[in-house]
């Protein structure tokens, strides 16, 4: 089996084809209803991230973040939780999904937030992070993200795509901010990452009234 990251690297001219298959599988995952007793609730996890950030964000921003996550409609939709092109593989013409330990359930916005992190946010300040993790140039992973969300939403309406993208970014930057505070708050990169996440969240929260789509 070869990951889609490796296939796209070897066949850049076929990127759109592989992103199409990638999104088809994502839609199949999100069309699957699960028993909530079988796996974690992603909304509860995200509420934990928001609660953690109460000590690190201005009070009004922290409250709005928590309230936005709390208001996300409850769904029993399956979520992979770490969905990117390293975790989707092709073997003998069959598309395979790996690394299932992050399976959960909830609204698809939580999945898109995780995807945004993997394809864009993790390497935003240092593109080499993305290159090392994904094995692809940063510009390629940004393209994959944009193409994937456009196909997922089944629209060429840039305003609609941007609207959903920003909803995912709210959760994505909140998760990244918490992660960075816990793991590398004292490093130079960590300080820059924290500042960037706070700036992005502040801007996004001003114009976001719902995370649902």
Image (spheres, rainbow, N blue to C red):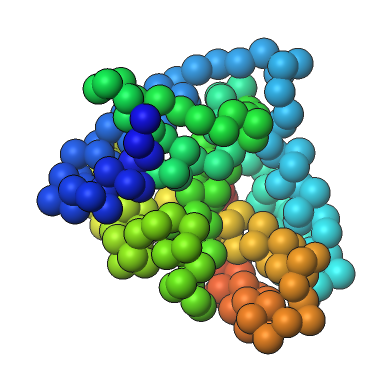
Quick check: can you spot residue 114? yes
**As drawn, 129 above or below 111:** below
Query: In terms of depth relative to the viewer, which is nearer, 85 or 20?
Result: 85
Snapshot quadrant of residue 203:
bottom right
In this view, which residue lies farthest toward the left?
13
State left or right for residue 162 relative to residue 29: left
| Residue 96 x/y as whole percent | 40, 25
State left or right for residue 190 relative to residue 77: right
Quarter of the figure that contains the N terminus: top left
| Residue 211 x/y as whole percent | 56, 48
In this view, which residue lies farthest toward the bottom?
188
**As drawn, 93 above or below 138:** above
> How many numbered marks does the figure carry?
0
State left or right for residue 170 relative to residue 70: left
| Residue 166 x/y as whole percent | 47, 59
Snapshot quadrant of residue 142:
bottom left
Instruction: Say which residue appears at 43% left-offset and 55% top-offset.
Output: 134
Instruction: Say which residue appears at 69% left-offset and 39% top-offset.
Output: 43
Instruction: Say which residue appears at 76% left-offset and 39% top-offset.
Output: 44
Query: In terms of depth relative to the viewer, which is nearer, 67 or 129?
Result: 129
Instruction: Say which residue appears at 68% left-offset and 86% top-offset.
Output: 188
**As drawn, 207 above or below 164:** below
| Residue 123 x/y as whole percent | 49, 68
Quick check: can you spot residue 149? no
Query: In terms of depth relative to the viewer, which is nearer, 9 or 156?
Result: 9
């Amino acid at each position: 089996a070869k990951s889609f990251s490796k296939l796209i690297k070897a066949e850049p001219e076929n990127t759109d084809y592989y992103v199409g298959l990638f999104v088809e599988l994502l839609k199949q995952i999100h069309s699957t209803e699960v028993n909530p007793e079988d796996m974690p609730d992603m909304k509860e996890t995200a509420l934990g991230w928001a609660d953690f950030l109460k000590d690190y964000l201005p009070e009004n921003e922290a409250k709005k973040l928590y309230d936005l996550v709390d208001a996300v409609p409850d769904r029993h939709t399956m979520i992979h939780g770490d969905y990117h092109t390293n975790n989707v593989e092709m073997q003998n013409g069959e598309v395979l999904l790996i690394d299932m330990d992050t399976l959960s359930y909830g609204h698809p916005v939580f999945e898109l937030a995780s995807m945004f992190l993997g394809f864009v946010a993790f390497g935003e300040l240092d593109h080499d992070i993305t290159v090392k993790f994904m094995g692809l140039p940063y510009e390629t992973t940004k393209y994959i993200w944009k193409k994937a969300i456009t196909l997922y939403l089944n629209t060429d309406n840039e305003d609609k795509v941007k609207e959903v993208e920003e909803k995912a970014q709210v959760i994505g930057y909140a998760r990244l901010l918490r992660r960075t505070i816990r793991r590398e708050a004292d490093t130079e990169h960590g300080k820059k990452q924290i500042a960037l996440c706070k700036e992005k969240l502040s801007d996004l929260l001003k114009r976001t009234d719902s995370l649902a789509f």
